[in-house]
Image (cartoon, rainbow, N blue to C red):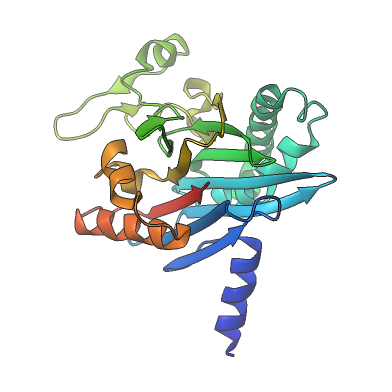
Amino acid sequence: MTGREILSKMKEKVGLGPSDPDSGKGKSKMQKHVTHGFHLVKGKSHHAMEDYVVAQFKQVGDNELGLFAIFDGHLSHEIPDYLRTHLFENILNEPDFWTEPENAVRRAYRITDNTILDKAVDLGKGGSTAVTAILINCHKLVVANVGDSRAVIYKNGKAKQLSIDHEPSVERESIENRGGFVSNFPGDVPRVDGQLAVARAFGDKSLKMHLSSEPDVEVEQIDDETEFVILASDGLWKVMSNEEAVNAIKHIKDARAAAKHLTEEALNRKSSDDISVVVVRF
């Protein structure tokens, strides 16, 4: 086995990306039929890959947590990489995580963003969106997001979006109340201060006065009617609707194959952005 293959195996084991392309899979020890898979593909831009993934099961005492996330950087790969290694750690360090996970997630997002801003000299400019999902003992899913990476669950035969796309045009009033503005130039998407195409993000110190990092948090119970969850960066959602995404993989039982199929479908539809997909099957 070559050094590259050994490294790939090690990364797959701990559930970390990125690479070009990169993929991996794993399963719950608590319930063997609960599996995950991920796949990343670099976009056509000239900068380094800015998407980072977490996908792993972790034993914490008598409990098992599934930790899943996609961090999509803009003008930065240092910040999403920092989030990959620190955000879940901060969430799990919150004393009320087990009793009030929604509050713990909100607080940890805030603390993490403040740390990123404090470390701006080391981490550089730019920022990152995030969508995170914590599966608690295979029956409770806590989803949070800032930005336009998205989580969609397929349950009762329907696609249901668990996150909110934070678009500048939708949050114009709060941006303006902070002293910012939303540009809307012909042929371009709305942008905060004419720069950023999302209304919430980690980092972005130069825009932070006009930008929120407050996550939306959603809790979903996993039952017998729940089939799978998709987490993906906007490289997928720019070219596929929620319904198109779930229909594309609902008959693919292998989670990694499902994630890879979605990245390939996004490429077929001419997505030029970095594309990252995590699929968790129940």
Residue 32 relative to residue 76: left or right: right
Image vertical order of residue 47 relative to residue 155, above or below: below
User: Foreground residue, 185 or 227?
Assistant: 227
Can the viewer see residue 124 in this picture? no
How far across and how far down the image is residue 9, in percent?
60, 75
> Residue 12's image quarter?
bottom right
Please tell me which residue is depicted at 56% across the width and 34% down the height of the picture: 222
Residue 238 falls left or right of residue 167: left
**Would you place residue 47 above or below residue 144 in this image?**
below
Which residue is painted at 62% across and 39% down in the image? Answer: 134
Residue that sits furthest to the bottom in the current view: 1
In this orientation, which residue lies closer to the viewer: 208 or 145? 145
Q: Quadrant of residue 118?
A: top right
In this picture, is 195 found above or below 65? above
Which quarter shows the N terminus? bottom right
Image x and y of residue 228, in percent: 46, 44
Residue 184 at what x, y percent from top left?
A: 23, 25
Residue occupying the point 65% across, 54% down: 28
The number of numbered badges drawn on the structure is 0
Which residue is drawn at the image coordinates 36% and 26% (left, top)? 167
Residue 37 shown left or right of residue 9 in the figure: left
Q: Is residue 224 visible?
A: yes
Q: Residue 194, relative to residue 234: is it above or below?
A: above
